Image (cartoon, rainbow, N blue to C red):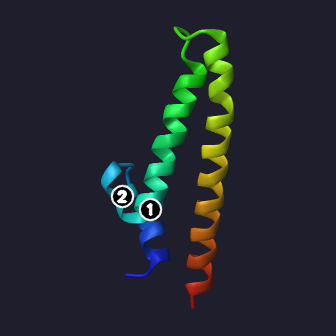
């Protein structure tokens, strides 16, 4: 099965972590976790305002790294398509 076919099955099927794990590389999953944790720190209402503000750059960096990695992965899939 090609990467494109795996992507298509993942997109059209029900959402579940097993499908994401098969579609995304471990580095993508780690970037998702990093972005999730940073976003949680940035939006945690029990934290101080200073802590939330300090977490925003970490979230932005993680989100940008994830976006770049995913675009790169999708470009590789597109290039591999017949």
Image quadrant in which you'd find residue 77 = bottom right
Q: Is residue 52 above or below residue 35?
A: above
Count of labels shown?
2
Residue 2 at x, y percent in the picture: 43, 81
- Please tell me which residue lies in front, 61 or 63: 61
| Residue positioned 43% across, 64% down in the render | 25
Give residue 6's mark.
none
Element at label 1: loop
Residue 31, x across and y down, in percent: 51, 49
Identify the secondary structure beneath mark 2.
Answer: helix
Q: CA distance from mark 2 to mark 1?
A: 5 Å
Task: Give me the residue at 42% from left, 64% from top.
Answer: 23
Crowdedness near tag 2: few (<14), some (14–19) or many (≥20) residues, C-alpha within 10 Å: few
Q: Which residue in the structure is indicated by mark 1?
A: 24
Residue 77 or residue 28, whichever sits in front: 28
Residue 2 vs 68, above or below: the answer is below
Q: Is residue 62 left or right of residue 27?
A: right
Pick the front one: 23 or 36: 36
Neighbour tally class for label 1: few under 14, some 14-19, many 20 plus, Cα within 10 Å: few
- Locate the C terminus and report the quarter of the image it occupies: bottom right
| Residue found at x 61% / y 17% | 51
* In the image, farthest residue toward the bottom: 82
Instruction: Residue 60 in the image: state x and y as whole percent.
Output: 67, 39
Which numbered marker is on residue 21?
2
Residue occupying the far left of the picture: 18
Query: Where residue 50 sits: x, y (%)?
Result: 67, 14
Contact, mark 2 vs mark 1 (Cβ under 8 Å):
yes
């Amino acid at each position: 099965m090609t990467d494109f076919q795996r992507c298509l099955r993942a997109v059209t099927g029900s959402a579940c972590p097993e499908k994401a794990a098969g579609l995304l590389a471990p580095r993508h999953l780690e970037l998702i976790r990093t972005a999730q944790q940073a976003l949680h720190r940035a939006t945690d209402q029990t934290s101080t305002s200073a802590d939330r503000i300090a977490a925003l750059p970490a979230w932005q960096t993680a989100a940008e790294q994830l976006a770049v990695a995913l675009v790169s992965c999708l470009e590789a899939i597109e290039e591999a398509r017949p």
